[in-house]
Image (cartoon, rainbow, N blue to C red):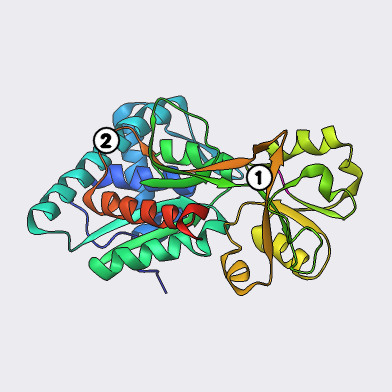
Amino acid sequence: MESPLATPPRRLRIHAPALRYFDMVRRTGAIREAARRLNVASSAVNRQILNLEAEIGSQLFERLPAGLRLTAAGEVLAHHVLTVLRDAERAASELDALRGLSLGHVDLITLEGLCHRIVPEAIGSLQARHARVTVAATIRDSREIPAAILAGEAHLGLAFEVRRHPSLRQLAMVRLPLGAVVPPQSPLAGRRTVGIGDCADAPLILPQRNFANREQLDPLLLGAGIWGQVRCEAGSVELMKQLVLRGRGIAFMTRIGLEAELDAGRLVHVPLQHAGTPLVSELGLYARNNPALPTAADAFARHLADAMARATPAAGA
């Protein structure tokens, strides 16, 4: 069954269908998948792409065994199409604002760990006020999220340690302590802070390099000479959490994704310090600089910012 979120429930159709078809092929890399999401025949999508190529006089996609990839001409058209579609979306948003926000759709790209509490809290509070606004949340690696926002794949991106970019706008930011995650019976559980060297006697569980804070941890482990204690590198918050719960070692991460276990007292998060300075990781909410956010996305951004603020230790999380 086609997901109700596969295509937003309402879009102004004040631009040529070929542009929407082209954009969906660009995003999916396949005619058939684009047609499925658009709920039209594959032949209709293919015909629109061929017509565009004939009109422009250039091939827009390379046909590769792994799928379709934009040519140089396709990249130029993609930039134009993205602007046209976002402008149409903004016009629809402004019309919605005149009537009061009742309909709308938001695309979010984020991380797995943020879907334990921050994202569902924000969706819940948004839809409590605007029940017919739909949200699609896609999980990606930290490194992929900025480029995905810039490519127009989502209105909003929520990620750790995003490098500044002139075309990215930071809508909200919180700094969260990096810490050692231990069971309550651990000798470290009663400490206010720990240094990386304090963990030398236990097996260590590290996030893989798809986690932004891995770059912060590597030099500390090498400097302390305890790299040999690493027993597992995990690509998910859930796996790191489960390993600690099973007594397999100490993990290093923020409190994000551990909320239920910390609240229940099944795990303890002890902030890390290095040379007397607390180690923190910056969690930011981002959008493209232009165009302006649609009304629904702007409303969702405010709810996400509130949920982020509640996740900080100062807020009692």
Three-letter amino acid code at the position of disc 1: Asn
- Residue 306 sits in which quadrant? bottom left
**Residue 316 or residue 41, whichever sits in front:** 316
Q: Which residues are magenta?
A: 207-211
Please provide percent x and percent y for residue 148: 47, 41
Three-letter amino acid code at the position of disc 2: Pro
Q: Is residue 237 above or below residue 292?
A: below
| Residue contact between numbered discs 2 and 1, judged by CB atoms under 8 Å | no
Identify which residue is drawn at 41% across, 26% down: 73
Residue at which label 1 appears:
210
Please provide percent x and percent y for residue 285: 42, 44
Please provide percent x and percent y for residue 18: 28, 44
**Residue 185 or residue 267, whichever sits in front:** 185
Image position of 138 (left or right of 253): left
Residue at which label 2 appears:
291
In the image, residue 135 lies in the stretch drawn in magenta = no
> Mark 1 or mark 2, which is nearer the start of the sequence?
1
Residue 22, can we see it? yes
